[in-house]
Amino acid sequence: MEMKKGNSSRYLLALVFILALTFPTLLSASSSYATKDHLFPEFIKWHVSVVNSLSYNQSLFTHCKSSEDDVGIQNLSPGSGISWSFRTDFFHTTKFWCYVTKDSASLNFEAFWYDARLFEKCDWKNCIWVAKDDGVYLKGLSGRVDELVYKWDVGN
């Protein structure tokens, strides 16, 4: 197959465009792109959970949603939780947030957003948020310890 001189730059530009869509980390220094093996987050079925691990038999009120889906309002008894599943959108804008309250404190927090660091912490499929007395932790999967990510807003 012969290529004319004028067409070679168009072919090269098309190849770069295809590579940028297929492997965004090759052309970007940003750490927010997913990089695990050959998987794209758009093809993963994500599971997010919020668990009540408060002491003293405290209930946890939750309301989690995204711009397109509302998980609903729940009043979680100690030891119980809520879970939901979804796939991210192609444009990497999928985001879930939760409003949670306990006796004298409340908190608004992001429960899912497009970020490779979050994906690693969630072991590329399960984000488990645990409400404890001092704040909300991201459950350490793959043997890692739980990480305090959000502290309670007291008196709200």
Image (spheres, rainbow, N blue to C red):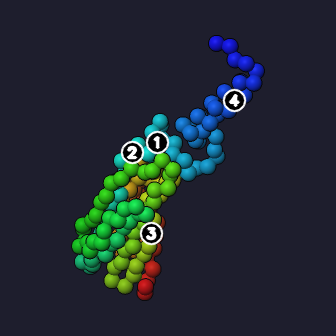
**Disc 2 + disc 3, Cβ < 8 Å:** no
Amino acid type assigned to the residue bearing label 4 in the image: Arg
In space, the residues marked 3 and 1 are separated at their CA atoms by: 25 Å
| Closest to the observer, 64 or 36 | 64
Badge 2 density bin: few <14, some 14–19, many ≥20, Cα 10 Å: few
Q: Badge 3: how crowded within 10 Å, few (<14), some, or many (20+)?
A: some
Q: Which mark is residue 40?
A: 1
Asked if the residue under mark 4 is in contact with the one under mark 3, i.e. CB atoms within 8 Å, the reply is: no
Q: Where residue 44 is drawn, which disc sits there? A: 2
Mark 1 and mark 4 lie on one chain; the one further toward the N terminus is 4
Residue that carries the numbered disc 4 in the rendered image = 10
C-alpha distance separating marks 3 and 4: 46 Å
Residue located farthest toward the right when viewing the structure as drawn = 5
Identify the secondary structure beneath mark 1.
loop
Q: Secondary structure at mark 4?
A: helix
The mark that comes first in sequence, 2 or 3, is: 2
- Amino acid under disc 3: Phe
- Closer to us: mark 2 or mark 4? 4
| Residue 106 appears in the figure | yes
Q: In this rendering, would 100 be left or right of 3?
A: left
Q: Determine whether label 1 and label 4 are within 8 Å by CB.
A: no
Give the spatial CA distance, label 1 vs label 2. Answer: 7 Å
Q: Which residue is mark 3?
A: 109
Query: In the image, is 121 to the left or to the right of 11?
Result: left
Write the residue at 38% across / 56% down: 127
State the residue lying farthest toward the bottom.
Answer: 155
Q: Quadrant of residue 152?
A: bottom left
